[in-house]
Image (cartoon, helix red, strand yellow):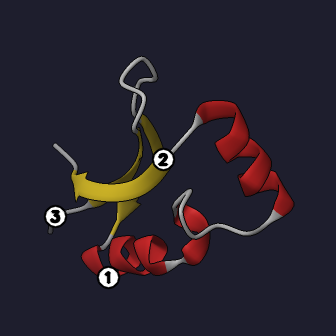
Amino acid sequence: MKTYRIVRMFIDNRIRNRVIKKGLTLEEAREHCKDTETSSSTCSTPYRVAYTKRVGQWFDGFEVER
């Protein structure tokens, strides 16, 4: 069975992508990425808004683990 990982990606290419979660099913990965708090353009919690001000635009995506 394939597993997936969540990768946080940044518009600023000087910031390396970061693995946020590992070992997820495809359904779990999709569910994570549907959350509005997993993108700088839709997040609203004070923590995520401050994070966006610090690092710029970002979003979470998923990919198959190798």
In the image, 34: left or right of 49?
left
Q: Which residue is mark 2?
A: 58
Work out whether 44 lies above or below 14.
below
Q: Earlier in the sequence, mark 1 or mark 3?
A: 3
**Residue 51 appears in which quarter of the rendering?**
top right
Q: Three-letter amino acid code at disc 2?
A: Trp
Q: Residue at x 48, y 47 (%)?
A: 58
Image x and y of residue 46, in percent: 85, 59
Cα–Cα span, label 1 and label 3:
11 Å
Of residue 5 and residue 34, the one placed in the foreground of this image is 34
Identify the element where label 3 is drawn.
loop
Which tag is nearer the camera, tag 1 or tag 2? 2
Q: Which quadrant holds the N terminus? A: bottom left
Instruction: Tell me the crowding category of disc 2: few under 14, some 14 to 19, or many 20 or more residues within 10 angstroms, Cα based.
Output: some
Identify the element where label 2 is drawn.
strand
Residue 22 visible in the picture: no
Identify the element where label 1 is drawn.
helix
Q: Earlier in the sequence, mark 1 or mark 2?
A: 1
Q: Residue at x 43, y 81 (%)?
A: 31
Q: Residue at x 22, y 49 (%)?
A: 65
In the image, 40: left or right of 8?
right
Q: Three-letter amino acid code at disc 3?
A: Lys
Q: Residue at x 45, y 54 (%)?
A: 59
Cα–Cα span, label 1 and label 2:
22 Å
Q: Which residue is mark 1?
A: 27
Image x and y of residue 63, in percent: 22, 54
Cα–Cα span, label 2 and label 3:
26 Å
Res 2 label: 3
Which tag is nearer the camera, tag 1 or tag 3? 1
Which tag is nearer the camera, tag 2 or tag 3? 2
Image x and y of residue 52, in percent: 65, 45
Q: Three-letter amino acid code at disc 1?
A: Glu
